[in-house]
Image: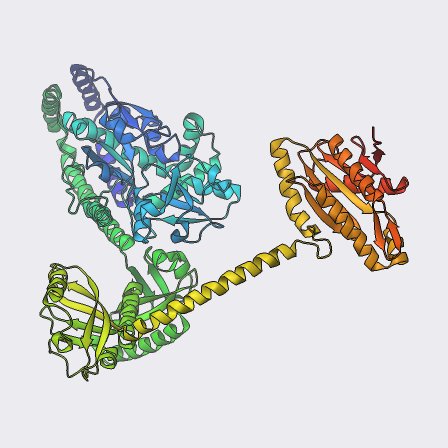
Amino acid sequence: MNNPVVCAARDRLDGATCQLRGGLLVRLILFGVAICAALPALALDSVTLQLKWRHQFQFAGYYMALEKGYYRDAGLDVRLLEAGPHTDPVVEVMAGRAQFGISSSELLLSRQTDPVVALAPIYQHSPFELLVRADRASNLHELVGQPIMLEAGSAEILALFLKEGVEPDQLTIAPHSLGIDALLQNEVAALSAYSTTEPYLLRQAGLDYNAFSARAGGIDFYGDILFTSESELKSDPERTRAFLAASLKGWQYAMEHIDESIELIMANYNSQDRSRAHYRFEAEESRRLMRPDLIAIGHVNPGRWRHIAETYAALGMLPEDFPLDGFLYEAEPPRLDPGLLVALAFALAVALMLALLSWRVHGLNLRLRGEIDQRVVAHHKLAESEALHRLLTENSGDVIWMLDLASQRFDYVSPSVERLRGFTPEEVMAQPMQDALTPPSAEKVAALMRETIGRLLAGDTKAIYVTTEVDQPHRDGHIVPTEVVTTYLLDKAGQPVKLLGITRDISQRKALESELRTRVAAIEAAADAIVITDTQGRLLYVNPAFTRQTGFDRESVKGHDTRILNSGKQSRAFYAQLWQTVLAGRIWRGELINRRKNGELYEEEMAISPVKNEQGQIEYFVAVKRDISGQRAMERALQAANQELQQNLDKISRLQEILAEQAVRDPLTGLYNRRYLDETLAREFARTEREDSPLAVAMIDVDFFKRINDTWGHSAGDEILKRLAQCLQLGVREGDIVCRYGGEEFLLLLPRIALEIAFQRAERLRRDFADSALEWGEAQIQATLSIGLASFPDHAQTPQALIEQADAALYRAKRSGRNRTEVASATSSAAVTTAVTPG
């Protein structure tokens, strides 16, 4: 710690010490050599640290402790082990394969079964986040039913889901691939990640994502906990103390020399082949999570661990009041080796002899040392006090702030403002105070401040403290209702200069108040009668619907027994069973006949719910009563109406089937139309590909059809088309599809048939149609067909290409003289065909 005052004092001490004579210095060196020679050689103690993952900046402090010799100076030979996808540091430490490990705050959950000891949290805030594709979800509730990947140690992410009202069994959790590819390829909607690593990769990949952290949800856990086992701590507490001290010293150096740390990782630990820019991102994010400028690295707050335990307990992950005894590390004073004590005693004797020779500087040294110690102690206390206050401020759920009244800008805003409103403290302090409020609240606060300052200037000291409610805008656009408690700070002249405030989110309170008002209004406006009684059945409250239902005035019945409604239609056993149920704390539901004030009987459906106090004792009963007399009378009529409706629905269903059939049928021929073909061809083609079977298409056209229409009229042409449709239907197999393609063109789809057989069928159709004649008055109309034939896979590989090939073959048949069948060429484009003549 480079405190200028301390450094100056040390310089003065060094100057005085240099006045010792050279002979004295020589004798000191000789004595030191003799003492060192007398000490036994100390071998380095081998220990293993199980890392949480592969080498990265996340472990820079341990690399620096090795590189700078801090472990060696502590008498330790430290080996760092990378973790694999299935490595659990707790398992490794408990199995004795490592003496120390790194875990998350989930270490507290492991304490239930394994005697682990938390030594120090490296991250004051957990780096765990849930990264969600922006195109899949904008909040946690939208992830229900979608696949998400959670790695081991993600308990705080599950805790965040539970706090948001999402149970773990509602989640579709997939094993974590320990990479981001599944998120990039949209195989999962979200994955757990470290804020120090994966966000950088997603930004590099250009993926738009949302990040949800447990800290933003009020679950602020530690991260990267250095831990050991109780057996290791008991067997060698000095080794644990030395390892912890050297590790924290390494972390202090790493965070003060980030560039040097990155270069060391690039040279010796870059097993993941990352760039300097990536490590720079990881280092800056680590700094944000550690806050070494405010909080000592490794600082442990037992109260915060208790809060973490209570959070787990509230979410059902730990028992209530889970003991932390033995879980949090308490350092013991270092034990000295007996041989070392002897040497130190000898050295002390020598030092006393030398002290007689250095009496001339003794007084000066004593005064300077006292001054240094006092200033160091004072500085440490000041730093600890400042760090404590900053820690309390930063981790407060409320927002603490200081406003300069002259400039109307914030001098300080605690980090919790980001949880409250989505803005960072820096963003809030960069704007005037009015921007932190909605326009109506800004006007309200301005008026209140004018009034309060006026009262203060008039000598009203009670006006120093003001509490009010204001609305504040959130970054995402919604409004946050808050309660603000303020204290005006006065200068020596009694003028108000600053405003110290604490802002608290009252969204939940407002919601509860609104819900209460809504429920009261709903009860008052309810159509059902609602009754509240004591445990003896005396009426305490009835709503207006009770009066409408029974005829009793709501004020006149208060204090009366519910038996004023008794009709005598229920047996004693009925009421005994009812009371037995509700007094046992269960809900009773049933129907009964009661009597109105005018003596009229009515049927009633009722549910009675017991209401218990905090001790679990029943204090009230709430009954919801519905008059169902008219309902019972209507049920028979409704049943008859339902039967009639069902009959009508059956008729409609049959009509819909007819309409659906007509939509795909040609009205003239009764064949399927082109719409049906378009819907069916792709399906048939896909099945043909799966079955690896042929598919033939015959395109059929009536020759000189226009001449028939012009000569004999359109009625004759229609009869020709009907006759062709009959011929086509006579020859079809099951699975064949016959369509009127348009005008005088027809299409025959022939699945699972060889081209040669398809050609024979086409020729038979052509000959049969040519041999038949249409009797038309006293004349006979003779017509012929031209047919184009194509087959998959011989002529085309797609449905559209197959139609085009058949159409091109039909065109060739027309061009070649009509009344013939042409087959598409297997080696040419769709426009080129070749004739196939019957054998």
Position of 175 relative to 129 (above/below) = above
Whether residue 125 appears in this view of the structure is no
Quadrant of the frame with the C terminus: top right
For this rendering, which residue is in front, 772 or 699?
772
Residue at 67% in and 41% down: 736
Whether residue 352 appears in this view of the structure is yes
Quadrant of the frame with the N terminus: top left
Spot occupied by residue 820 in the image (x, y as percentages of width and height) = 85, 39
| Horizontal relation, residue 344 to residue 516: left or right | left
| Horizontal relation, residue 101 to residue 257: left or right | left
Could you say which quadrant of the image residue 246 lies in?
A: top left
Could you say which quadrant of the image residue 572 lies in?
A: bottom left
Spot occupied by residue 108 in the image (x, y as percentages of width and height) = 22, 39
For this rendering, which residue is in front, 422 or 466?
422
Spot occupied by residue 149 in the image (x, y as percentages of width and height) = 40, 40
Position of 317 relative to 392 (above/below) = above
| Horizontal relation, residue 356 to residue 666: left or right | left
Position of 50 relative to 463 (above/below) = above
Q: How is the image coloured?
A: rainbow
| Horizontal relation, residue 170 to residue 368: left or right | right
Residue at 83% in and 56% down: 716
Spot occupied by residue 717 in the image (x, y as percentages of width and height) = 82, 55
Number of disc labels: 0
For this rendering, which residue is in front, 626 or 399?
626
For this rendering, which residue is in front, 269 or 384?
269
